[in-house]
Structures are given as C-alpha cells and as structure tokens.
Amino acid sequence: MRPLCLAAGIEAGGYSLGVQEAVVDFGSEDSFNLAAERLSRHHPLRLSASTVRKITLRHAAKMAALEKKTHCLGRLPATGPSHIIAETDGTMLPVVQTSGKSGTDRRKHRQCQWKEMRLCAAKAKGNADAVYACENESVEELGYRWSHCAGEAGWAVESQIHVVSDGAAWIGRQARQCFGANSSHLLDLYHVSEYLAAAQKARPDWDNNPMWLEKQKKRLLRNQAKQILKELEPHLEEEKCSEIDTPIRSAWRYLSNHLEQLNYADAAAQGLPLGSGLIEGGHRHVLQKRLKISGSWWRKKNLHDMAQLRIQRANNKWDQYWKSAA
C-alpha cells in the first residue's frame, strides 16, 4: 500500500494528472521535442520527447473516443440566431506508413504521402467563436458532425443556414442533406475571382485593361453573373483543348454550373460573409498549426487522434475533459 501515491492519484513510474495536463498542453501546440524543452523551463521536471509523445497521444486517443460518442442532435429549439454560418473544406496533412518485418529498420520501408482531413465549422452571425469538427474517412460522417456544429452554434427552427464553399460537389450534397430547405449556398467570391483573373490573362485586350476584373466583380455583387457569361461566351476555347489551356471556358463552366450559388447581393444586404474565411482560418489555426509543422509525419491513427485533440481545444472543451479525467 502506498497511501501518498493513492492520495495524489499517481502510480509507480506514472505522472500526476496535473503533470499530464501540462505535458499535453505543450505537446498539443509544439513538436514533442520543443514541448519537452518548454516543460522543463516552466516546471521542475525533465521528460524525454518520447515520454511527452506517449502521454499526449494517449490523451488524444481518449478525446477521439469521446468524440465518437456524440449523441443525436434531436429536436431544434424554437428560437435562436437569425443566421448560422456553416462552412467546410478539406486540407492535406502528412501521413507516413511503414512496412517490413519486426526487428528491421522500418525507416527504410516508409512511405510518406498526403491525406485529406475535412474540417467543418459553424457559428452564429455576429458571434466570434465557431464550433469545429473534423473527419478524414466518411463524407457522410462529416455531414453528421457538421450538423452538430450548427446545433452547438445555436441552430433553431427559424434559423437560416448560410453555407459558403468553393463549389465542391460533396459540400453541396452534404449541405442539402444536413440543413435542408432553410439553407442557402453561396460560392466563395475569392474562388470566382481566381477563375475570372485567369480568363483575363488569356486575352490581351482584357489583360491590358486593369478595370476589366473589377468590372466583373461589381457585376457579381449586383447578381449580374449572366452578363459575365455573355461576355465570356464569344471567346470560349475549343472543347478538345485541355483544361489548362482553356481558362475562359473554365471560368464560363464554373459560373454556369453554380448560377444558383451567386446571390451575393442578398448576402451582402444581410451582412453575411461572401467568402469562406471561416474555414480557411480554421484550417490554419485548428489543424495546420500543429499537424503540418516542418518535419512532422504522422501515422494515420495518431493524425486522427491529434486532430480531435486540436478540435477539443478549439471548442473550449479542454477544462471539461480534464475535470472528467480527474
């Protein structure tokens, strides 16, 4: 019997919950080497990078397991925010796979590749804090989590869901399935401008006119996309050419396929975003800040678990987790 260890909640060769929280706090923000260094600078103990890694990944796996237990969204409340802004997109993160027999140097058999991690977010109009979730396997599972983000952001019966995206088919499909008729889908203005900028460079008379692109942007903001199509149409390249060599046709096709998602005038009048800055910023500070640092390559499960850990921090559930772990 070790009364002191029992009272402190530690075991031989283990660490107190307070130390573990400090370790995971540092390990979730920096490389495990740097986390160990910073831990020793602020606390009177020295741990190896491998120990920091082990503790951080163990708690990351527990947080990921909690995320799987998300309950059904259930009935929406009668009142809530007038608008919920909902966005989703994917980002590429580094994954490593090793092969070879046990006892051999598996570093010689490793394969490094990039895997897509889809992130979704939702927030009430006028609210600075967003709710995040991520998924790297099933698009349908991501949609389920996306609806939960909207629910935690205050989604009510009368709320309008304002979706902004780059026009990917899977996003439109999930938006319809998750949010139904009380939603509108807007094409990210920056992506549209990129297509038009590429088309401008294809013709010298447009390229030499610095106001050509600005004119098209003003047309977009006035819901005059059909006038843009009319101007592009006489100059379409032949269909047999590759997409790289047909910037005008690419812009024309992009706008034609998303005409119902170009209602910028109404969105601007209601003070709703015209771009997907919410999810782009989310990729940077929720996932990429830790999972895409130089030299980091992750095993698939560890990448998933660390992503869920980052989600817990972004959603302000950090204290809730450690209180339940006590």
Image (cartoon, grey):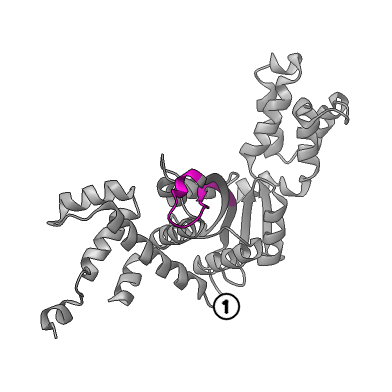
Q: How many labels, in total?
A: 1
Residue 146 horizontal side relative to residue 238, left or right: left
Residue drawn 60% across and 45% down?
274
Q: What is the crowding at mark 1: few (fewer than 14 residues within 10 Å), some, or many (at least 20)? A: few
**Quadrant for the C terminus in the image:** bottom left
Q: Nearer the viewer, residue 239 or 32?
A: 32
Residue 193 location in percent, x, y?
66, 33
Residue 145 location in percent, x, y?
57, 66
Picture quadrant of residue 46: bottom left
Q: Nearer the viewer, residue 211 or 3?
A: 3
Amino acid marked by disc 1: Cys
- Residue 280 visible in the current orientation: no
Q: Is residue 26 above or below residue 158?
A: above
Give the residue number, with chain letter if any, for mark 1.
72
- Membership of 23 in magenta stretch: no
Q: Nearer the viewer, residue 125 or 313?
A: 313
Residue 271 location in percent, x, y?
56, 49
Residue drawn 60% across and 62% down?
142
Picture quadrant of residue 319: bottom left
Highlighted magenta segment, given as a residue range? 89-108
- Membership of 106 in magenta stretch: yes
**Quadrant for the N terminus in the image:** bottom left
**What SS does tag 1 mark?**
loop
Residue 49 horizontal side relative to residue 271, left or right: left
Residue 56 horizontal side relative to residue 142, left or right: left
Q: Is residue 305 above or below residue 40?
A: below
Residue drawn 70% across and 37% down?
220
- Residue 289 visible in the current orientation: yes
Outermost residue to the bottom: 1
Residue 151 location in percent, x, y?
54, 69
